[in-house]
Image (tube, grey):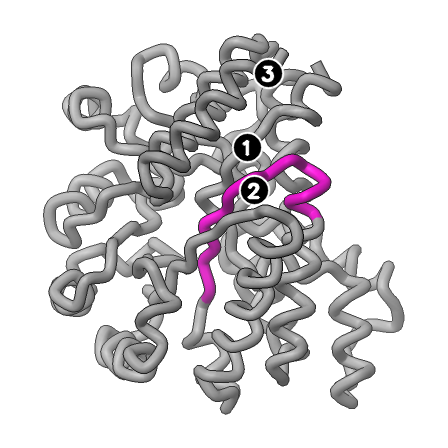
């Protein structure tokens, strides 16, 4: 199964570029930018990745982002992830970035997106990896902050395919961002949102009906509401599920308890993704392999998950058809 997964063409739909910052690159960028880290070495930082909940992860995540200072830093971060895509046979990726994380540190929007965009363009030309870019609003910040961020994004609108909503769900329901999502959709941005990871199933309803999102990021708590599951099936609303992330953040006690294959068998358009792989212990192949090892996922189930990702992605239909054909022909 390992060799089957390794060679399978894949699409990734839930990947935070800041969450690909490996300890080695963190130290390299800190040295380049003259930043003193509160860790003696790479292994000390790696040990700090043993967090216990979403908030402790977010604290570490935002601290790590502090080493990203220049356009070259953001290029190098993105390029390192894209090289991992090549290794894991990810043919198309839809990447989240969190501009507020960097704007709050005094980094210009142009610096952030310039480095990311340049790497994505280079990857399409030299690696054959296509991509979309999704700008996320941080839900623990105010909607006013999100509006300010959207304003700064407008000169770069051609480089941004959609908007999303991430960070801590608890106490930050989708309704808090109804106006900013309405404005973003009016401007032509597509919309997705994190919902139903640590938050309740009702957040998924609200993301769909208040924010008018077309995809739900995570969404595993949908099983608490049979009517919601029925809607997801009937409307083929995709869930971008992240198995190893769910394990690390204690959404499930073990991968063997994960509900992704149950949802697949019910007809939900579930997909496999890596979320913040540097922190959660695995990129795309690792996540697929975890399903094979712990849930005894069959080759056919693995293939269906990969096909769901193609269905759910934002590529033009002609490019989707090419990917579908490659996945169906793969043995």
Q: Quadrant of the C terminus?
A: top right
Q: Secondary structure at mark 3?
A: loop
Q: Relative to 66, is 193 above or below?
A: above
Q: Quadrant of residue 218?
A: top left
Per the rendered image, the range of residues in magenta is: 84-97
- Measured from the top left, where is residue 138 in percent x and y? 37, 67
- Dot label at residue 330: 3
Q: Quadrant of residue 205?
A: top left
Q: Are marks 1 and 3 in contact (CB under 8 Å)?
A: no
Q: Secondary structure at mark 1?
A: strand
What's the residue at 32%, 35% (across, down)?
A: 317
Instruction: Please say whether residue 95 is one of the residues in the magenta stretch.
Output: yes
| Front-lying residue, 275 or 5 | 5
Q: Is residue 22 above or below residue 93?
A: below
> Of label 2 and label 3, which has the lower sequence position?
2
Kindly report the distance in space between the C-alpha atoms of the residues bearing marks 2 and 3.
Answer: 22 Å
- Using the image, tell me which numbered label, if any, was put on residue 196: none
> Local crowd at mark 2 within 10 Å, few (<14), some, or many (≥20)?
many
- Residue at image location 44% in from the left, 21% down from the top: 259
């Amino acid at each position: 199964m390992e060799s089957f997964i390794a060679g399978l063409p894949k699409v990734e739909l839930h990947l935070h570029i800041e969450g690909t910052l490996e300890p080695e690159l963190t130290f390299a960028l800190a040295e380049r930018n003259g930043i003193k880290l509160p860790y003696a070495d790479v292994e000390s930082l790696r040990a700090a990745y043993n967090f216990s909940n979403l908030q402790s992860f977010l604290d570490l995540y935002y601290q790590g982002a502090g080493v990203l200072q220049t356009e070259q830093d953001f290029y190098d971060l993105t390029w390192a992830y894209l090289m991992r895509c090549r290794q894991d046979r990810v043919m198309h990726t839809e990447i989240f970035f969190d501009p507020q994380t960097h704007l709050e540190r005094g980094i210009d929007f142009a610096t952030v997106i310039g480095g990311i965009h340049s790497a994505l363009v280079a990857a399409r030309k030299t690696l054959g990896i296509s991509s979309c870019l999704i700008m996320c609003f941080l839900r623990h910040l105010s909607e006013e902050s999100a509006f300010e961020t959207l304003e700064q994004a407008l000169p770069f609108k051609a480089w941004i395919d959609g908007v999303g909503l991430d960070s801590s769900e608890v106490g930050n329901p989708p309704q808090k961002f109804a106006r900013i999502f309405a404005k973003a959709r009016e401007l032509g941005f597509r919309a997705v949102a994190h919902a139903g990871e640590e938050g309740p199933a009702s957040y998924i309803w609200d993301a769909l009906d208040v924010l008018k999102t077309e995809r739900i990021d995570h969404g595993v708590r949908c099983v608490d509401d049979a009517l919601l599951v029925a809607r997801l099936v009937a409307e083929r609303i995709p869930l971008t599920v992240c198995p190893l992330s769910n394990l690390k953040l204690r959404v499930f006690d073990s991968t063997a308890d994960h509900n992704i294959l149950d949802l697949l068998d019910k007809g939900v358009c579930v997909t496999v993704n890596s979320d913040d792989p540097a922190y959660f212990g695995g990129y795309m192949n690792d996540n697929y392999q975890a399903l094979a090892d712990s849930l005894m996922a069959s080759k056919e189930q693995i293939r269906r998950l990969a096909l769901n990702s193609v269905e759910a992605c934002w590529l033009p239909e002609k490019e989707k058809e090419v990917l579908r054909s490659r996945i169906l022909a793969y043995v």
